[in-house]
Amino acid sequence: MSELACSDAAVLDAVDAPTTPDFADVQDARTRLAEGGYLADDRLATTVFLQSRLGKPLLLEGPAGVGKTQLAASLAEVTGRRLLRLQCYEGQDESKALYEWDYGKQLLYTQILREKIGQVVEDTATLEEAVDRIAAQDSVFFSSRFLAHRPLLEALVSEEPVVLLVDEIDRADEALEAVLLELLAEFQISIPEIGTVTANHQPLVILTSNNTRDLSAALKRRCLHLFLEYPDAQRELDIIRSKDTGLPDALAAQLVEVVRGLRELDLRKSPSISETIDWARTLSVLGASELTAQLLSDTLNVVVKYERDLATAGRSLPRLVDPNADVPDHLHGHGHGHSHGNHSHSHVGEDHAHDDGPDGAAVRRSKDEPGRHDDNYYGAPGSTLRTRTPDPSSSTARSARKRKL
Amino acid sequence: MQVDELLKPFPIKEFHPFPRALMGPGAHEMIGPEALKIGFRKTLVMTSGLRGTDIVHKIVESMKYHGLEVVVYDKVESNPKDYNTMDAVALYQENECDSFVSIGGGSSHDACKGARISVAHDGRNVNEFEGFNKSENPKNPPHIAVSTTAGTGSETSWAYVITDTTTDPDNPHKYVAFDDASVTTLAIDDPVLYYDCPTDYTAQCGFDVLAHASEPYVSRLNFQPSLGNALHAIKLTSEHLRQATWNGQDLAGREGMMYAQYIAAQAFNSGGLGIIHSISHAVSAFYDTHHGLNNAIALPRVWAFNMAANYERFADIAEAMGIDTHGMTKAQAADAALAAAIRLLRDVGIPEKFTDVTQDSYSKNRLGQGPTKYYENASKIVGDAKDVERITNHVLGDACTPGNARECTFETVSPVVDHCMNGDLDDLLT
């Protein structure tokens, strides 16, 4: 046996191999995820199966809203593991991700034990001797008792198997990425005061990234990698079906085509799967019996969340729904008070707040008010000639108010 | 009585920023290198087209020669409409431009400033930014303004004027937005580009300068740093406007008016305006007539209206206009200033009241097809009581009105408006 094999065996001993494998084979992974409400395609099911067998972390990259985070949640659900989530953000430091010394608790204990500490040092003659005596007791206060576990450490010391989700790793700084390397490769963390903590049960680690920056090669090397794209039309339709949105199949199929069309537009934020499901639910609540451009443009804000995108998407909707339809030029979110006359909505009984703003003529009339510019005239504060209403809190105002008695 | 009410109006004043400017014959040839220096890559050029002058073509070709990508929007109407601005915003976003150039007079510059503010707010409607510093995002695309008229000052001011035709189509509203964020990145004033400006436009733009200069000089803001600019602009206009109008291919008059317009704009930038502009905006809103023409017709009436509030200042204006005021009382000097202004108006051939202005009385109707859509459908100026009432209401809500030398109410302003519509200028001469 070569040395290498020896060391490999040592590592394997350090980590308890899962007693029961999570998945029997690829098909098993696929079926069980589907039971948990997550429809995986072959590629994804294969990757998940391999991850559970090889025990390597899985790095999922792809646009927002394709189900990266959801995969971790579903994986936890179907394997009966606990889900631990570390949400990454800019400026996050390791104390928020790994562990912190519970300073408050340490202080509390020293207060409570003041007498005891007094006894320990009472027979010392010099200050130096007393400090030495206390230092000998250091390890009491820097023990796991006073360690506040953060998600990464918790994943290792947890008594039950876990799925560890490191969400949006691309938002974290490179420093945190470096901290992760040890954990991902060895499933252990070194804490200077305590030593190395190894995993009780090997966690299933899933990292997600939206590609806002390139991750380091070192991190990618330690992970299985999968790029998740938006699902194909059939799978997206299956996903919508599985969520019981209440939208008839024929309409759902049409809706999926519309959403796929929207994703091809140059939008700041493309519609995600979950937003598509929301849209299906919205249309179902409105009792849609057919998808008209009018109805879609009225509910477009469920999937399109930027003003400019709304205009772009609104222009393309008729083409996506029906080449012969036309869409009203007014979309939600413009409060300019155009007088539109009567909208004829294809759904009834739904009191949805149309953001038409106030009546245009009224807005226009208000612009003829004398003195409406007095505040901040030419940028200068306090530049008014009109008689001010006295500030009710000022003393002059109080004296001017009529007494009640 | 609160302490701050004892203070005179506008106790705290603001001095507003102005951009770097290149001035003088040949300045327009610097546009390519200057644009590259600022970091332009793909530029939306906004203009009314300036059809028949070749100016737009020359400048666009010069920019392309320096390696810039150019998209042209040449449908800006005179008195730019909100839809002009929003069309340009759509074009800017579709082509993923990163900068603006406006070539023309105030219409092109103003529409462009509005478009920049709109672009910086994700394409929100430009009408939402009416008033004082209403924009929230100070970072908008860079903008080089190339002037082809001597009047607007928009290339150096913090104001832009847009006509709102959509809020209430039956009652259009021409509003001023003052916004420090809208100040251009670079102004280019090249008198050579003025040579082809038609006679009547030159004269009308010159009266825009006279209004820009005289209003801050007498305004209630009483902003001392503006006074020098104001007086000197009045002096330059009095000396050069006739020459620029009747001898347009000559550099001296054109250059004088270039400096006059620039410093006049600096004067009102911080010194405020008055109801010459308010009346002018109102008439433009309803009849789409030229801003300088409106100013020219309103100016003598408003001077007469404001004079009683401040004879001394009007006497200063008289001196700036070259009148020897030695031995005159302040009031006599003020009257002489008014007479000089009326004389200048008649010398450069501007109509004397609004009801004299017809669609074919000046060159706006010869702009060719395209940027006069709104004007072609404008009705003939009526000037009856109902018309005076709606114009007066527009005046009272205008952002220039609070600065007027004399306080304005419906009762005091409507006779002034009525006189602009139907009155005879000879009534004002003593």
Image (spheres, coloured by chain):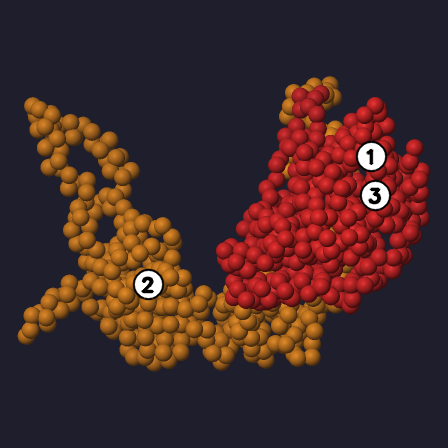
**Residue at left offset 88%, top offset 44%:** B420
Q: Amino acid at mark 3?
A: Leu
> Separation of disc 3 and disc 1 at Cα?
10 Å
Circles 2 and 3 in contact, beta carbons < 8 Å:
no
Circle 2 or circle 3, nearest the eye: 3
Q: Which residue is mark 1?
A: B337
Q: Which chain is orange?
A: A
**Which residue is nearer to you in this view: B121 or A120?**
B121
**Residue at left offset 78%, top offset 66%:** B368
Horizontal and vertical percent position of residue A373: 71, 39
Q: Which residue is mark 2?
A: A215
Horizontal and vertical percent position of residue A283: 61, 69
Q: Which residue is mark 3?
A: B344
Q: Quadrant of residue A198?
A: bottom left
Q: Chain of mark 2?
A: A
Q: Which chain is red?
A: B
